[in-house]
Image (cartoon, grey):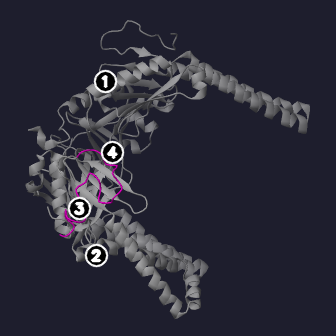
Amino acid sequence: MTSPDGTQGVPDGGIPSGGGPHDGTPHDGTPQRPPVTEHRLHPVTPFRRAWAPLAVLAGWAAHDPNGAQEQLDRLTGTVLLLGLAVLVPAAGLYGFLSWWFTHYAVTDTELRIRTGLLFRRTAHIRLERVQAVDVSRPLLARLAGVAKLRIDVVGAESKDELAFLGEREARALRAELLARAAGFAPETAHEVGEAPARVLLRVPPRELARSLVLTGATWGSLCAALVVPAVLWLVTHSLWTVVGTALPLVGAAGASSVGRFVTEFDWTVSESPDGLRIDHGLLDRAHETVPPGRVQTVRIVQPLLWRWPGWVRVELDVAGSANSVLIPVAPRAVAETVVARVLPGVTVPGGLSRVPRRARWCLPVWWRGHGLAVTEAVFAARSGLLCRRLSLVPHAKVQSVRLTQGPWERRWGLADVHVDTGADKTVTARLRDAGEAARLLDEQAERSRTGRRDALPDRWMSAG
Amino acid sequence: METGSPEGTVAPADQPVWRGLRPGLLGVRRLLLVVWTAVLALAAGLLPGLLVGPGWAAWALLPLGCAAWCWWLLERNWRSWRYAERADDLLISRGVLWREETVVPYGRMQLVEVTSGPLERRFGLATVQLHTAAAATDATIPGLDPAEAERLRDRLTELGEARSAGL
C-alpha cells in the first residue's frame, strides 16, 4: 500500500502503531500482532485550512460593509501588510500542524483516525458497522486531484471524514474498507480492488431539467424572488431593504433550480457486490456506496405535476447517513426495478387497501391519500393527496411497532399503526379500522421476527 | 404483590400475561398532586382574600376541584398501564384517552435502563426503559418493584442477547 504522498510510509511518519509516532505516549498497550501502517492525508490538505481566517474576514466585510469600509480607511498600508504577514503564515502553520497530526490506519476490523493538535481525538470505527462510504470531490479538489472520504456510522453525530486523500488513494481505500467490511480475508482485502459495477440507471440531463420545470418548489421560489423585492420596492423605496431581502431569495431560487440541476446532473445508480453506488454532480462529483442490507426505508415520492409523465423520485434512509436521494427522477417502472434491486425480494405493491370511508370525519379530504399494503417482504404505507409518498419498510428492518388511538379516532373505530426503523424514521399507516390495526400490530411483530431470521449478516461476503 | 391489573390469571398459551404497575406509583403521583394543589390553593385563596376581600378566597376552590378530578384521572391512567412479556417481544399498553400499544422485539433492544429517582426510591419504585436503534421507540415502564425491575432487566438483556439482530 502506498501512502498519499509516497514518502510518509513506514520510515519516518508512519511508525507502526502500538506507541504512536509521538514519544511519551505509551498508552496504547494492546499488543498488535501485524504492524499497522499509519498514513497521513494528502499534502494539499493544509491549504484547505489556510484560507479560513481570510474567509472569516471576508464574511465580516460582507455582513457589515459600512463598518468594514470605515475600518479599512483607518488602516494604513503598512498595518495591512503587517497584518497579512502575521495572519497568512499563522494560518499556514495551523493548517500544516493539523495535517501533520492527523493519521489514519486500517486494521482488520477497524479504521482508526487520530487527529487534533491540542485536543487529541482518536476514533476507531468498526468496519462491519459501516453504513455507507462516500467519496466526494468538490470542484477545487477535482482540480487538485484529491478527494474526500466520508464514513457513515450509526450514532455518531459528526461524520468522520478523511479530507483530503489522493484520488486514486481514496478509491483504493474505499474499496479496501468495503472489502474488509464485507468479510474478505485480511490478506486479500486490499487486493480485491474495486468490485465491478453494473449500471442500473442513468438520469438523462433533459429528463432532469424537465422534472425541475415540473416541480412546484422551483416556480414558488422563483416567483418569491421576483415578487417580494418588487413589492418591497413599491412600499419602502429603500434600496438596501430590497437588496437585503432579494439576495437570499434569489439564492434560494438558484439553489432549488440551477443548484439542484448541478448536483443531480449525470445521476448514476449502479450495483456491485460491495453495495449500491450512486455517482452524481456536474461540478462537485460525489460518489456514495451503500453496502447491502443497510437500507432501512425507501420512499417513492410523486409530486402532483409528475403524474402525467409518470415520474417518481426515490429516497432512501440509511442509519447514520444524511444522504437520502436514490433517484432524483425516473419513470415509475424503472424506479420500481431499481427498488427491487435495493431491497432484495421486494416488489413494490400495486394495489393498496384504502382507509374506511368514515375516516373522512377524522381527516377531511386528505383521507383519500392514505393507503396501506403489507406483503411478504414489506410494510408499505402511502400518504399525501397531491404529492403522494409511498414508504416501504422491509419487515427485517422494523425496530418496534406501535398502535395509537386518540379519543376522536376511537369514536369512529379507527387507529394508527406506526412502524419505527433504525434510521430514526417512522412509517405510519393512518386511520386503519381498529380491529384491523390490532391484528396488524400482532402480525407485524411476528413478521419482523421471521423476516430478521433470514436477513444478511453484517459481514455479507463471509456468509458463504 | 398487589397490582392494578389481575396478574398471573390463567390465560391460553398464545394470550399474553399482562402485569400492572405497583400501587406505590399511584401513591407517589397522588402525593405530588396533593402537595402541588395545597400550594396552589393557598396562593389562589390567600392572595385575592387578603387583597380584595374575604369572599374572593373562594378562588381556592378552583385548584381543589381540579385536584379532585385529577385524583380520579391519575387512577384511571395508572390502571391503564400494563405490560406483558411474550416469547419474542415485550408489549406495553397505556393511556386512557390517547391509547398506545408498543411491541418491541427482544432482538432489537440496544440498551435496557433501570432508573430510580430519590422520591421513587423512597417509595420502593423503579423505572425500566428500553432503547432500540429507533429513537421513536418509547418503551418505558414506570412504577416497578426494584426487584422486579432488575429481574426484567436481566431477562430482557438475556433474551436480547439470544435473539440479537443488527440494524
Dot 2: few (<14), some (14–19), or many (≥20) neighbours within 10 Å? few
Q: Is residue A260 magenta?
A: no
Spatial separation of the CA atoms under disc 1 and disc 3: 45 Å
Looking at the image, residue B79 sits to the left or right of residue B51; the answer is: left
Q: Which residue is mark 1?
A: B159
Looking at the image, residue A245 sits to the left or right of residue A212; the answer is: right
Residue B21 visible, this angle: yes
Q: Chain of mark 1?
A: B
**Which disc, if any, is residue A14?**
3
**Which disc, if any, is residue A423?**
4
Q: Chain of mark 4?
A: A
Residue extent of the magenta highlight: A6-31
**Element class at badge 4:** loop
Asked if labels 2 and 1 share a chain, the reply is no
Q: Amino acid at mark 2?
A: Leu
Give whichever of discs 2 and 4 has the lower sequence position: 2
Q: Amino acid at mark 4?
A: Ala
Q: Amino acid at mark 1?
A: Leu
Q: Amino acid at mark 3?
A: Gly
Which mark's residue is nearer the viewer, 4 or 1?
1
| Residue in the foreground of this view, choosing between A129 and B135 | A129
Q: Residue at x 22, y 32 (%)?
A: A452
Which SS type dominates the magenta stretch? loop
